[in-house]
Image (spheres, rainbow, N blue to C red):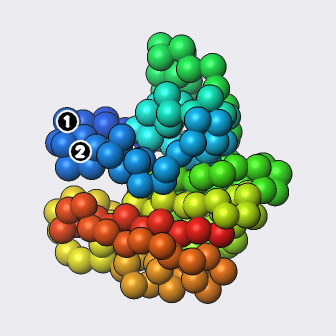
């Protein structure tokens, strides 16, 4: 299982100007319609690409989950620099989220669901922690050959991802392609 996980030594790739231009976090997050007091869970939060902007969009709790202690340490420093007092760092795996049932309004799963084994277990966990009517934003690599991103055999095609969400009981409310390499799916509980 661990061979599918992102290598923390490559964390500089997670937040660079090219990525911000192609996938601006604020624009992507606007698709969730985050309310002023929403509780949000950022899965595979990494260095805070989505966690930090979300912390400015809500006064509710923002949970930043990552399996890698190194990532959480970098994020801890960035949260402190930004003086975000509504961010909680959570060490854990998506397949077994260490949180209570129905505690968040929104979930962000950015470039992490292709690492989850089995995917159905991760989606069940997302559904478990989401409140009724809550939404999950899934940003992923499309399953086609390209230089960047994970190996082709680790990617999940947008059609497969949609079916996986629906099989768990979600309703996919939108699917868009911000670049030819990526898709954004919004799924509602």
User: Is residue 186 in view?
Assistant: yes
Q: Residue 128 in the image: x percent, y percent?
A: 75, 64
Pick whichever, 186 or 9, lies toward us.
186
Q: Which residue is depicted at the point 73% across and 58% down?
A: 131
- Looking at the rendering, which quadrant does residue 12 occupy? top left
Image height check: is 45 above or below 93?
Answer: above
In-image side of 175 versus 44 (left or right): left
Q: How many marks?
A: 2
User: Splitting the image into 4 quarters, where does residue 97 fall?
Assistant: bottom right
Q: Residue at x 49, y 50 (%)?
A: 33
Q: Residues within 10 Å of mark 2 (few under 14, many from 20)?
A: few
Residue at the spot of label 2: 19
Query: In front: 136, or 143?
Result: 136
Q: Residue at x 47, y 21 (%)?
A: 78
Residue 94's mark?
none
Residue designated by label 1: 17
Q: Is residue 157 left or right of residue 87?
A: left
Alpha carbon of mark 2 to alpha carbon of mark 1: how far?
5 Å
Where does the image place residue 47, in percent across and percent down from the top left?
Answer: 44, 34
Residue 93, horizontal then vertical, whole percent: 65, 54
Q: Are marks 2 and 1 in contact (CB under 8 Å)?
A: yes
Instruction: Give me the residue at 54% from left, 14% from top.
Output: 83
Residue 163, relative to residue 27: is it above or below?
below
Question: Is residue 47 shown to the viewer in this render?
Answer: no
Q: Percent position (x, y) of residue 85?
A: 63, 19
Q: Secondary structure at mark 1?
A: helix
Dividing the picture into quarters, in which one does residue 160 lie? bottom left
Q: Residues within 10 Å of mark 1 (few under 14, many from 20)?
A: few
């Amino acid at each position: 299982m661990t061979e599918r996980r992102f290598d923390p030594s490559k964390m500089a790739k997670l937040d660079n100007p090219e990525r911000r231009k192609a996938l601006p976090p604020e624009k992507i997050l606007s698709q969730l319609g985050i309310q002023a007091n929403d509780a949000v869970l950022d899965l595979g939060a990494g260095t805070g690409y989505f966690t930090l902007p979300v912390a400015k969009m809500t006064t509710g709790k923002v949970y930043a989950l990552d399996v890698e202690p190194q990532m959480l340490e970098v994020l801890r420093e960035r949260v402190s620099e930004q003086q975000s007092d509504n961010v909680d760092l959570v060490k854990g795996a998506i397949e077994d989220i260490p949180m209570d049932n129905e505690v968040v309004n929104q979930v962000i799963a950015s470039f992490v669901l292709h690492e989850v084994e089995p995917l159905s277990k991760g989606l069940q966990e997302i559904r478990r922690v989401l409140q009724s009517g809550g939404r999950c934003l899934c940003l992923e690599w499309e399953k086609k050959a390209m230089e960047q991103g994970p190996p082709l055999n680790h990617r999940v095609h947008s059609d497969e991802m949609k079916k996986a969400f629906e099989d768990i009981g979600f309703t996919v409310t939108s699917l868009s392609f911000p670049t030819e390499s990526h898709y954004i799916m919004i799924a509602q509980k």
